[in-house]
Image (cartoon, coloured by chain):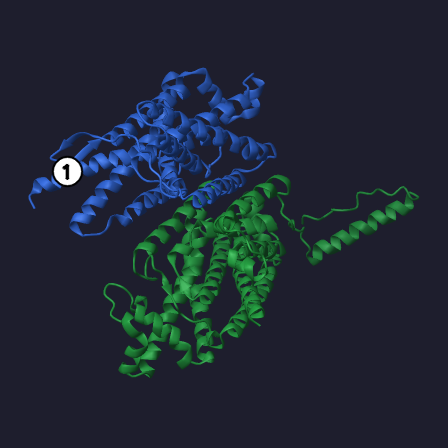
Amino acid sequence: MAEVAALSGLLAQIAVLFSAYAVIALSFNIEFGFTGIPNFGKALFVALGSYAAGSITATVLLNQLRGMLSEQQLQQIAGLGGLEAEGMPVYCTGGARNLLGAAPQYIGMGELMLLFAATAVIAMILGGLMGVLASYPALRLREDYLAITLLAFSEIFRYITYNSPWPVCGNAGLSGFPHPFTALGLRGDVAYAMLMLVILVGVYLLVDRLTNSPWGRALKAVRDDELAAEVYGYDIARVRMQSLIIGSALAALGGVMVSFYSGSAAAANYDPKLTFDIITAVIVGGTANNVGAVFGAFVIALLSVMLNPSALNIIGITLPEAVARALPFTKYVIIGVIILLVLMYRPQGVFPEQPLNTPVVRKAREYVERALHRLASAAGGAAPRAAEGEGGQG
Amino acid sequence: MPVSVYLYGLLGSFFDGLQIGAIYGLMGLGLTLIFRVTKIANFAYAEYVTYAGYAAALVAAALGGPAAVVATLLAAVAVAAAVALASDELAFKPLWHRGATSLTLLVASMAVGFVLRYSLLTVAAARNLLELRVELPRAVLFTVGGIANFTTVHLAALAAAALITGGLHWMFTRTKMGKAMRATASNPTLARITGIDIYAVRRLTWLLAGGIAGIAGLVYAYHTYINPESGWLMLLWMFAAAIMGGFTFLGTLLSGFILGLTEAFVGYILSITLGVGTEYNIVIALVALAFVMLFRPEGLIRLESYALRRRA
């Protein structure tokens, strides 16, 4: 039985990481794939969501517990860690961590679920606002400079939050807050993973809808030729800002998803490595293809979880000591090699960008095909074979 | 405390600011050279510095005596130049042939950087080599009031930065090879038609840039302890110096000094007045980079264009 439990825990971990990465990759795909904005500060927006999730949840839960329990009970649960905080948030104390750990015993699943939903919404709003800020450089700089600038922004944000006790306890990180189903133990983790997959499906449908709408075609127009898009009446600044707002809000949602599972929000986790994971997912999967982004996220999530001696142990692989110690470091060697190979031999990714497929384009293609067919029969079988692709790039 | 202590402290932060500024500038020079000639914002450059630091530290630890200085220098330069050339031949040149955009090359350079850094980390973790320093003799050359010291490390950083910057500037503006590099940068096809061997120019560029990274890595590992991620942690400063300098050599060095001195002075003043720790120092350079990018992306300093215009 223990094996089944370990295996389902592992699967839950993969599912959660995959869902969160997929949501972030879809958001990066909107910005990078469809609009052509290299938002290499992705880690910042994810971190923002994670910080919002952690600090709001911890504050609300502590306040609720304060209202429900007597002073004596509080002190008893808090234990030696205490609840005295000087120059830092109360939820950073050791006592607060104990209290947060005990919270699911006193606070119902429904309420925790509500809290999860509320923090997700707040995080997305914060992410969207940050996206407005990020659109300021995005309108002024050319691609590679923009990438470096946004990367610098995300590093500034990380350094400040890593060194300051606000909002997430500096280098120690805020930890120990529960997800909605923590009370159920392992089954709760699996349930949480299911919830994440449901959210992923919702986000995927939303993003797919958006990118196949006239708005999505506006994004591609801005990416392919700014001048032409402007001539056709698109407000480029507006389109780019909208793309960044939606992308950043979804990235913040990804941060919420991943940080509730680990119960922690720590600045140390949101460095450029995370951004690089997402870039890899989108480029390997295929830029401007939503299926590709999800596929790439799955590959990355699988690599992240499985390149770990304990995870390999669960599926029955035991490694020698030296290999086991070095194994976690090999993840980025593998990812780096993958991305170089993809860039060289399949730059369009595993799932290349699809040509437009709106009703008008479909009609036009059918019309052209019919006309060619008529022509071919009129010419007596000497059919021209170049019927494909006509009207494909409407 | 008497005022003079603060003055000595200020002088000390001036020395340290000069030193770290020279290191920023020195590291930025190779980045500038690569960007000037091949138009790659090369994130993997940080790894050449790290590799050089490791090579230098290992050789210095293995050898002793006066020969160690020369051997260390050679090892650092050779390793970094080899890694730089290999990364171009195996990754950047094939991509460039396939018509990769500057952003694709940037992503590729991040990938190369990850491969190099984590290979080193894998080996270093297995061999317990996660903290290294170049153990060459260190000495205080002169001191002011026993507080502000000028050491051999200061001298090495400043001398290396000044010599290499001067050399590169001279090469780029006064020699045939510099002219060939500029021609290759502005239009490879035209350069090729006029008889320039652009592949030789490219190879030389990467070897030179790698060599500069080698010296920078040696100086940095002489200055402080390094680990496999040190170069990466310095990368945004290198970019800050190079971009503020408008990707020119003199500009890069000057921007390095500006960054280093600002960090040292602001850090010192904040720490004695507000008691703020030095951990926020690093934010200063990044904020400077962000501001330059937003408001003057062509760089602050444009000395080289004057030098070229005067000779034209």
Q: Nearer the viewer, residue B70 or A150?
A: B70
Q: Looking at the picture, how far across and down is residue A165, in whole percent?
A: 30, 60
Q: What's the residue type where badge 1 is placed?
A: Ile
Q: Residue furthest right?
A: A380
Q: Nearer the viewer, residue A133 or A68?
A: A68
Mark 1 residue crowding within 10 angstroms, few (<14) / some (14–19) / many (20+): some
Q: Colour of chain B?
A: blue
Q: In which image quadrant can residue A118 be found? A: bottom left
Rendered position, A386 above or below A29: above
- The x, y position of residue B147, in whole percent, is 14, 38
In the figure, A39 relative to B95: above or below?
Answer: below
Colour displayed for chain A in the image of the structure:
green
Question: Which residue occupies the foreground of this view, B298 or A99?
Answer: A99
Task: Name the secondary structure under disc 1.
Answer: loop
For the N terminus of chain A, which image quadrant? bottom right
Residue at horizontal 44%, vertical 25%? B208
Q: Residue A80 location, x and y as percent?
A: 28, 72
Residue carrying label 1: B147
**Residue A86 located left or right of residue B145:** right
Kindly give the residue lying farthest to the front in the view shown: A320
